[in-house]
Amino acid sequence: MLVATANSMTGATRERFGALIADDEGREVARTLLAEGVAVAAADGADLGPDFATEAFDFLVEVGPSLRSSMLHDVERGRRTEVDALNGDVVRRGAALGVPTPAHRAM
């Protein structure tokens, strides 16, 4: 979920993660992506623990100022990205399990 969140946000915007979470709107997008991922994982039987989304968000905030994801590098170089393998997998699993994933679908 960490990678799907940070990579998709930076790849879609061509910005470092720290710049994206510098305001409430960006932080909300990150929290939403994490929450959707956790909901899909839980529906699929994974126990990530009750604080995973919060701990993951806090970690991303900590590393955010310097984070240039691999997806951002791929976008900048015109390479194929892993968005389908990351966010697309969350969307497909969510659909199969009846869990809405609009933020991951948007990515």
Image (cartoon, rainbow, N blue to C red):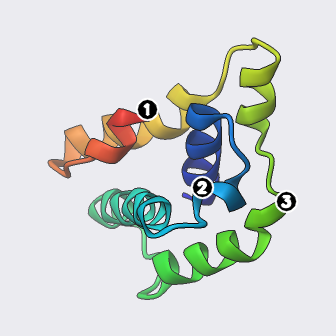
- For the residue marked with disc 2, what is the amino acid? Leu
> Which residue: 57% across, 40% down?
8
- Whole-number angstrom distance, CA of label 3 to CA of label 1: 26 Å
For the residue labelled by badge 3, is the local secondary structure a helix, a strand or a loop? helix
Vertical order, 11 against 78 (above or below): below
How many residues crowd mark 3 within 10 Å: few (<14), some (14–19), many (20+)? few
The residue labelled by disc 3 is 66
- For the residue marked with disc 3, what is the amino acid? Ser
- Whole-number angstrom distance, CA of label 1 to CA of label 2: 21 Å
> Which residue: 42% across, 56% down?
33
Residue 105 got which mark?
A: none
Asked if the residue under mark 1 is in contact with the one under mark 3, i.e. CB atoms within 8 Å, the reply is: no
Tell which circle, 3 or 2, labels the residue nearer the N-terminal end: 2
Tell which circle, 3 or 1, labels the residue nearer the N-terminal end: 3
The residue labelled by disc 1 is 88
Vertical order, 12 against 99 (above or below): above
- For the residue marked with disc 1, what is the amino acid? Gly
Image coordinates of residue 31 in percent, x first then y, are 43, 67
The residue labelled by disc 2 is 20
Residue 91 vs residue 16, the one in the foreground? 16
For the residue labelled by badge 1, is the local secondary structure a helix, a strand or a loop? helix
Asked if the residue under mark 2 is in contact with the one under mark 3, i.e. CB atoms within 8 Å, the reply is: no
Q: Quadrant of the N terminus?
A: bottom right
Vertical order, 70 against 44 (above or below): above
Image coordinates of residue 48 in percent, x first then y, are 48, 76
